[in-house]
Image: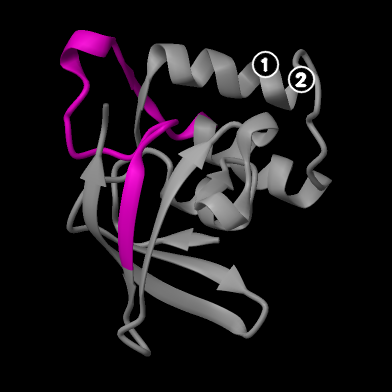
């Protein structure tokens, strides 16, 4: 997973929750080690901010995100959730999935690259809705 000159911003409470999942502190953390390693590498680069200072247009846990695939103009929309709440049929994607790991901490308008079964793709974050 590669990002294109983007600064990664995370809320401190999200960071702590993600570290807890990575350390096995929560139940139902069934994700592969490569995704865990990729997420851990992303977390190391993050700028941590408090809830009050967190920008509204940055992807975090429970964000609803719309992204556009640059190569095909396909638009995807989903909510980024913890692994125990993931359900692709209901549009909830795990933070531990490659797409979740790639998007966490980046904001509307930024481009992100990540690997999909067909190779590496570039996506632009069109919209971020935080509740």
| Cβ atoms under marks 2 and 1 closer than 8 Å | yes
Q: Which residue: 52% across, 32% down? A: 43
45 within the magenta span = yes
Q: Which stretch did the figure color magenta?
A: 44-67
Residue 80 placement, left or right of 71: right
Question: Closer to the camera, 97 or 131?
Answer: 131
**Badge 2: residue crowd in 10 Å (few <14, some 14–19, many ≥20):** few
Q: Quadrant of residue 94?
A: top right
Q: Which residue: 82% across, 45% down? A: 33
Q: Quadrant of residue 36?
A: top right
Q: Is residue 27 above or below residue 29?
A: above
For the C terminus, which image quadrant? Answer: top left
Question: Closer to the camera, 22 or 31?
Answer: 31
Q: Is residue 49 above or below residue 8?
A: above
Q: Give the percent coordinates (x, y) of residue 75.
A: 33, 73
Q: State how far apart marks 2 and 1 are (Cα).
A: 5 Å
Q: Give the percent coordinates (x, y) of residue 5.
A: 29, 57
Which residue appears farthest toward the bottom when viewing the image? 72
Q: Give the percent coordinates (x, y) of residue 107.
A: 24, 46
Q: Which residue: 59% across, 31% down? A: 82
Residue 48 placement, left or right of 85: left
The residue that mark 2 highlights is: 23
Q: Quadrant of residue 84?
A: top right
Residue 16 placement, left or right of 29: left
For the N terminus, which image quadrant? Answer: bottom right
Q: Is residue 106 above or below residue 24?
A: below
Which residue appears farthest toward the front when viewing the image? 90
Q: Give the percent coordinates (x, y) of residue 40.
A: 63, 35
Q: How is the image coloured?
A: one colour
The residue that mark 1 highlights is: 20
């Amino acid at each position: 997973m590669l990002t294109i000159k983007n600064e990664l911003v995370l809320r401190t409470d999200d960071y702590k929750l993600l570290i807890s999942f990575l350390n096995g502190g929560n139940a139902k953390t069934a994700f592969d080690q490569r995704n865990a390693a990729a997420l851990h590498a992303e977390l190391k680069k993050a700028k941590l901010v408090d809830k009050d200072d967190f920008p509204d247009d940055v992807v975090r846990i429970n964000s609803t995100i719309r992204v556009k695939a640059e190569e095909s103009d396909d638009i995807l929309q989903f909510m980024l959730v913890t692994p125990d709440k993931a359900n692709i049929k209901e549009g909830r994607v795990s933070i531990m999935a490659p797409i979740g790991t790639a998007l966490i901490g980046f904001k509307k308008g930024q481009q992100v690259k990540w690997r999909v079964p067909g190779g590496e793709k570039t996506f632009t974050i069109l919209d971020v809705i935080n509740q």
